[in-house]
Amino acid sequence: MIVKRIIPCLDVKEGKVVKGTNFVSLRELGDPVDMASSYSKNGADEIIFLDISATNEGRQTMVDIVKETAEKVFVPFTVGGGVRTIDDVTRLLKAGADKVGMNSAAVTNPELITESASRFGSQCIVVAIDAKLYDDGWHVMTYGGSKDTGIDAIKWAQTAEQKGAGEILLTSVDTDGVKDGFDLELTQAVVDAVRIPVIASGGCGKPEHFSEVFKKTDVSAALAASIFHENTFSIEEVKENCKSQGVNIREAGLL
Amino acid sequence: MIAIVDYGMGNVASVSTAFRRLGYDVLLTDKLDDLEQATHIILPGVGSFQAAVQEIDDRGLREPLQRLAKEKPFLGICLGMQLLFTEGYEGGISSGLDIIPGTVEKIKTDYLLPHIGWNALNITIDNKPFKSFQDKHVYFVHSFEAKTNSNFLVATTDYGTDVPAIVQKGNVFGIQFHPEKSGEVGIEILKAFLQAG
């Protein structure tokens, strides 16, 4: 049967992998292509690049990074961040990305999902949802989790599916950066609401958090950034832990 | 020289990179002359069956591909694998290349579609070099599957139903998953095709 996917996420700013997206104390960690290549060799099932560049030059650099990654990395990879138009989607897919993620622009203009999916197929369109818990349920947050749209996140996930999304990348703004585990309640609520795969994100601080989200929810994949980048844990350690907990994963390594 | 048929259906760059990595010369082409010269023909593709058939017919490649499949090692990948069959039901009914008998139909399963992700191979014939890929994980992205005689199956994968993963008829192979996105295992499978073909 299909395995649970373990995905490292690389935040890229002006061509370099950086730590943290909260612009306060960005620290350069390395070259995105080298890091993606190394993760794929260590058993990553997929790679996600999140482009947080603030400039047009940075965005163009991302296209070059995508081209080079497609030459050197032999697992699927997704690129998100700053995708506003069908032209942005086209440019990234043509450069070699397997999937493109869209977030704020899809909330403002849901037709972007439909237009992209009908041109390229739902399988390459990922809608990223940043959600935060309020008294009346989870709200969709935009602009890096800072702006409350007031939109119900569960309903938005269903709309995104109807519009043609092939996958949901779900980040809990509440657990993001806390390193105390994924948001199990939010994750299961979205998984129950849609018939497309969901990737859980936000809150992973150790390998056990992966096995926890896979055992306690029906999520298809889970993502982490800092625990991999800072060499706190390797992808192999995460997979070993998942395996010991009975989670169906892909054995990394050669024949 | 390996010819990769570039007929406007999806990104073929990573397929060509994978073969280059194995040390082969690769040419992306839709020109008949190039295909005639090639040692191996690779038919990749992402998108809908009907659109792909249209692109092939627009280029006048239907008959040449059918003929070349009798003459040299030929590999269809993903949609390219589905095109090897007689008829496809995606986007209406359309005629495939009819190189392997069978139809291409929506997968009947209780699980989510598309079938996206890493799934394990079950090798159904006692065939070196493919036997060594038993239980190895490869990367799938598709909603339609080949319905064909079990004689043509080399490998299947379990997605609530047995989905054909590798098919073969003589020197013609079809791979439903993406070997170029399946890590080291995928590269080894391409190598196995080159050795078998």
Image (cartoon, coloured by chain):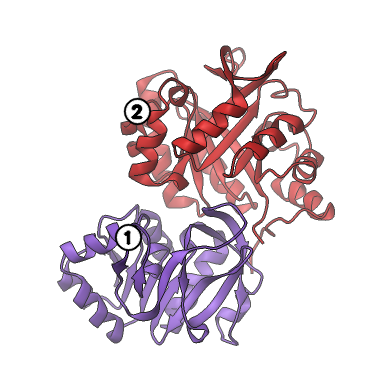
Chain colours: A red, B purple
Q: Is residue A218 left or right of residue A52?
A: right
Subunit under mark 2 = A
Q: Quadrant of the N terminus of chain B?
A: bottom left
The x and y percentages for residue B112 are 58, 52
Residue at 43% over, 44% down: A97
Residue at 25% over, 60% down: B7
Residue type beneath disc 2: Thr
Residue for badge 2: A85
Say if labels 2 and 1 share a chain.
Answer: no
Q: Secondary structure at mark 2?
A: loop
B124 shown above or below B107: below
The x and y percentages for residue B146 are 46, 71
Q: Residues within 10 Å of mark 1 (few under 14, many from 20)?
A: few
Q: Quadrant of residue A68?
A: top left
Residue for badge 1: B92
Q: Quadrant of residue A133?
A: top right
